Amino acid sequence: MNVTRHLARNPRTRAGRALRLLVLQLSRVWDEDTAILWQIRLDEWWRAFGHLTRERTLLRNGQLGYTHDRLRKAWFLVQNIVRKDLIFTYVVYGNPRTTSPLEGGVNAQLRDLLKRHRGMSEEHRRRAAEWFLTLHELSFEEAAKTAAPAPTKQRPKPREERDGPALYDTGLDAGEGLWERTGWAGRA
């Protein structure tokens, strides 16, 4: 998609058409042999058209610019990914090619769980996600054994009795304005 952004769907130059076709062939690479063959074709493209990425032209404003700027950008996108060994990680490590199975599987169910229980605190949501993932990895009996017991709340220590009014209390006080008023303010 990024290469198509630079080259368009129908590149004008032969070099652009060849590079776009080469990039589209990436979807057919599933094993090491086809990955090696693809990289050989990429080197052949460079030998045939690489000189175009270095050509310069005098622009209208008097400065030099690259003649085939879009081709150059598309080439460097592909070349940087190949140089950093990021292009065929799914072949080298045996990973899935995309994250699509995750989105339709575990991630979607976990997102649905958290959406249905929006009122939980953040800590409770973490524990729910942890429990969900544990249940999907282990059987229910094994997960129940591994679950840590909930921390028990400690009872508050009894307060010492003081002389005088309490600073914070549940009792009513006339100073709070909860009593019937008399005099001018209460109109009684």
Image: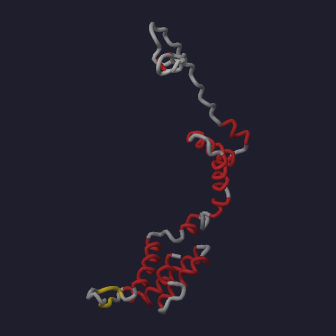
Residue found 39% across the figure and 89% down from its top: 52
Query: Is 41 drawn above or below residue 86 in the view shown?
Result: below
Query: Is 186 drawn above or below residue 64 in the view shown?
Result: above
**In-image side of 172 versus 108 (left or right):** left
**In-image side of 183 versus 131 (left or right):** left
Residue 16 x/y as whole percent: 48, 88
Total number of numbered labels? 0
Q: Nearer the viewer, residue 89 or 18?
A: 18
Query: Is 93 drawn above or below residue 146 in the view shown?
Result: below
Q: Nearer the viewer, residue 94 or 166?
A: 166
Residue found 32% across the figure and 90% down from its top: 57
Q: Outermost residue toward the top?
A: 163
Residue found 51% across the figure and 84% down from its top: 8
Q: Outermost residue toward the left?
A: 62
Q: Quadrant of residue 99?
A: bottom right
Q: How is the image coloured?
A: secondary structure
Residue found 73% across the figure and 39% down from its top: 141
Residue 101 x/y as whole percent: 65, 62
Q: Nearer the viewer, residue 186 or 148?
A: 186
**In-image side of 7 versus 149 (left or right):** left
Residue 148 x/y as whole percent: 62, 34
Query: Is 93 drawn above or below residue 83 in the view shown?
Result: above
**In-image side of 17 versus 67 (left or right):** right
